[in-house]
Image: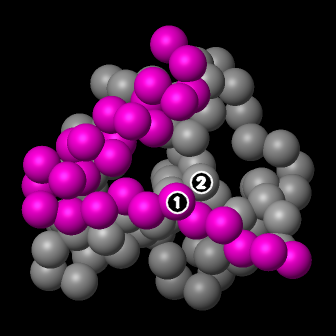
């Protein structure tokens, strides 16, 4: 499965739950996660999407650590089967 297919499923599932998974682009700050997931009840998390078996680059790891240190949940998803669990976890926080 391609990363773009996983990304499409994340967007669709977030929308089904009444939320959004918006593209995160930050000019001048490379390595940010691919999506910001916004769910009902003021739930927010950052999600880095990867093709199955792929790992984040060192700069992406750094950005994810920075976001976590600020108190934001950050997830790496490399398979469509992970999406439901990640969204459930975001809702539970």
Q: Whole-percent x and y of residue 81?
A: 32, 24
* Residue stretch rendered in magenta on the structure: 1-28
In the picture, measured across the screen, residue 20 lies left or right of residue 16, that is right
Q: Whole-percent x and y of residue 35?
A: 51, 58
Residue 23 lies within the magenta run: yes
Say whether residue 74 is visible: no
In the picture, measured across the screen, residue 40 lies left or right of residue 11, that is left
Residue 77 lies within the magenta run: no
Determine the residue positioned at 27% across, 76% down: 43
Determine crowd level at label 2: few under 14, some 14-19, many 20+ residues with C-alpha closer than 10 A: some
For mark 2, give the secondary structure: loop
Determine the residue positioned at 35% across, 42% down: 10
- Numbered tag placed on residue 23 in the rendering: 1
- Asked if the residues shown at circle 1 and circle 2 are in contact, with their CB atoms under 8 angstroms apart, the answer is yes
In the rendered image, the vertical position of residue 82 relative to residue 29, given as above or below: above
- Numbered tag placed on residue 34 in the rendering: 2
């Amino acid at each position: 499965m391609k990363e773009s297919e996983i990304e499409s499923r994340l967007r669709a599932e977030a929308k089904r739950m009444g939320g959004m998974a918006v593209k995160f682009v930050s000019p001048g700050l490379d390595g940010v996660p691919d999506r910001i997931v916004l769910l009902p009840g003021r739930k927010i998390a950052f999600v880095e999407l990867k093709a199955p078996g792929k790992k984040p680059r060192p700069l992406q790891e750094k950005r994810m650590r920075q976001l976590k240190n600020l108190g934001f949940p950050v997830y790496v998803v490399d398979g469509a089967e992970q999406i439901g669990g990640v969204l459930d976890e975001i809702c539970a926080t």
